[in-house]
C-alpha cells in the first residue's frame, strides 16, 4: 500500500469516527484540505497560460507559464511519483494530528457501544432473542418489545463494532482480525475459550450477541490500555486410552480444564 492510499484510508477512517461523534484537530482539517486541494489541481499552469495569451500579460511571464505548462505534460508515471513524494511529506503530520484525538474519540465510541451492549443484555434477559417468534403470540407486551428490541440492538451493535474497531485502529490497537475484535468487545476472563469462540462465530437473528449473552459475558468495549488479542482455541486432538479391549480413541480438547482420562 503506497502512502497515497494510506492517506486516503486514514481520511476515510477519520470521517467514520467523526460521523459517530468523534472530533479532529484544526490542524488535521487544514492539512487534509490542503492535500485534497493539491490532488484536485489538475493542470493550473496550462489554464493560466491560456488566460495569459488571451490577455495582456507580459510575454516574459507568458514564457514562464509556458515552461510550467510543459512540466505539466509529464508522463502519468512521473506525475504519480510527484504525488507519492508529496504524500510522504504530509503523512507524518497528518498521522500526528490523528493521534492527538484518537484516544478521546475511542472513548466516545466505546461509551456508545457499551450502552448498546447493556441495552441488548437487558432485552435478552427478558426473552431469548433467538426464540421462535410464533411463541410471542401469547406473550405479554413487555416480552414482545424485548424480542423486537433485541433485533434492533443487535443490528446497532454490528454497525457500532465496525466504528469501534476503526477508532481503536486509529488509536494504535491491533484489531485487524477477530482475535483483536473479540477482545475489544467482551471480557472472556475464565470462560471456556472454545465456547467463547463458538459464541463469537454464531449466526442467527441476532448473530453472536445472543450467544455471548447466554455465556454470561458482558458486551462492552474494553479499555485500550488493557486490550490484548484473544487467541483462538487450540485444535482438538485425538488421543487414546487403555480399555479392556485395547486402545480406544477419544477427542481431547486442550482448552478443557477437566483431567485428561488417559492421564487419570
Image (spheres, rainbow, N blue to C red):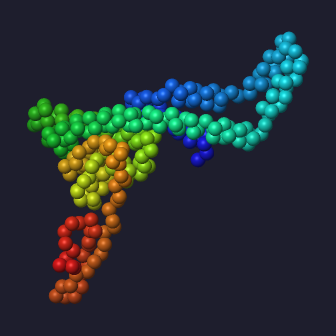
Q: Position of residue 184 (x, y in %)?
A: 34, 46
Q: Quadrant of residue 51?
A: top right
Residue drawn at 28 percent across, 47 percent down = 186
| Residue sitting at the far top | 56
Give 213 or 245, whichever is nearer the viewer: 213
Residue drawn at 39 percent across, 29 percent down = 21
Residue drawn at 85 percent across, 17 percent down = 53
Left or right: 126 with respect to 222?
left
Residue drawn at 30 percent across, 35 percent down = 111
Left or right: 188 with respect to 166?
left
**Vertically, is 94 above or below 56?**
below
Q: Position of residue 14 (x, y in %)?
A: 47, 34
Q: Quadrant of the C terminus?
A: bottom left
Q: Position of residue 2 (x, y in %)?
A: 61, 45
Q: Is residue 155 visible?
A: no
**Vertically, is 74 above or below 30?**
below
**Vertically, is 34 above or below 229?**
above
Q: Is residue 75 visible?
A: yes
Left or right: 92 with respect to 22?
right
Q: Quadrant of residue 118?
A: top left
Amino acid at each position: 500500500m503506497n502512502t497515497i492510499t494510506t492517506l486516503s484510508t486514514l481520511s476515510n477512517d477519520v470521517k467514520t469516527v467523526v460521523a459517530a461523534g468523534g472530533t479532529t484537530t484544526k490542524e488535521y482539517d487544514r492539512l487534509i484540505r490542503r492535500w485534497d486541494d493539491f490532488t484536485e489541481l489538475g493542470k493550473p499552469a496550462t489554464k493560466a497560460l491560456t488566460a495569459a495569451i488571451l490577455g495582456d500579460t507580459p510575454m516574459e511571464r507568458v514564457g514562464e507559464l509556458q515552461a510550467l505548462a510543459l512540466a505539466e505534460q509529464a508522463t502519468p508515471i512521473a506525475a504519480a511519483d510527484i504525488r507519492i513524494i508529496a504524500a510522504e511529506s504530509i503523512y507524518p503530520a497528518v498521522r500526528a494530528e490523528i493521534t492527538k484525538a484518537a484516544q478521546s474519540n475511542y472513548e466516545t465510541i466505546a461509551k456508545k457501544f457499551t450502552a448498546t451492549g447493556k441495552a441488548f443484555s437487558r432485552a435478552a434477559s427478558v426473552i431469548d432473542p433467538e426464540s421462535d417468534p410464533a411463541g410471542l403470540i401469547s406473550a405479554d407486551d413487555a416480552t414482545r418489545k424485548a424480542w423486537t428490541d433485541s433485533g434492533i440492538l443487535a443490528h446497532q451493535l454490528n454497525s457500532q463494532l465496525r466504528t469501534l474497531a476503526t477508532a481503536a485502529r486509529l488509536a494504535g490497537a491491533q484489531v485487524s482480525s477477530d482475535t483483536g475484535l473479540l477482545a475489544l468487545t467482551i471480557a472472556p476472563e475464565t470462560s471456556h475459550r472454545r465456547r467463547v469462540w463458538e459464541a463469537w462465530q454464531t449466526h442467527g437473528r441476532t448473530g453472536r450477541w445472543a450467544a455471548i449473552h447466554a455465556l454470561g459475558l458482558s458486551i462492552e468495549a474494553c479499555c485500550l490500555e488493557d486490550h490484548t488479542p484473544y487467541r483462538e482455541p487450540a485444535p482438538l486432538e485425538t488421543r487414546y486410552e487403555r480399555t479392556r479391549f485395547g486402545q480406544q480413541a477419544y477427542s481431547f480438547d486442550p482448552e478443557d480444564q477437566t483431567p485428561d482420562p488417559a492421564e487419570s
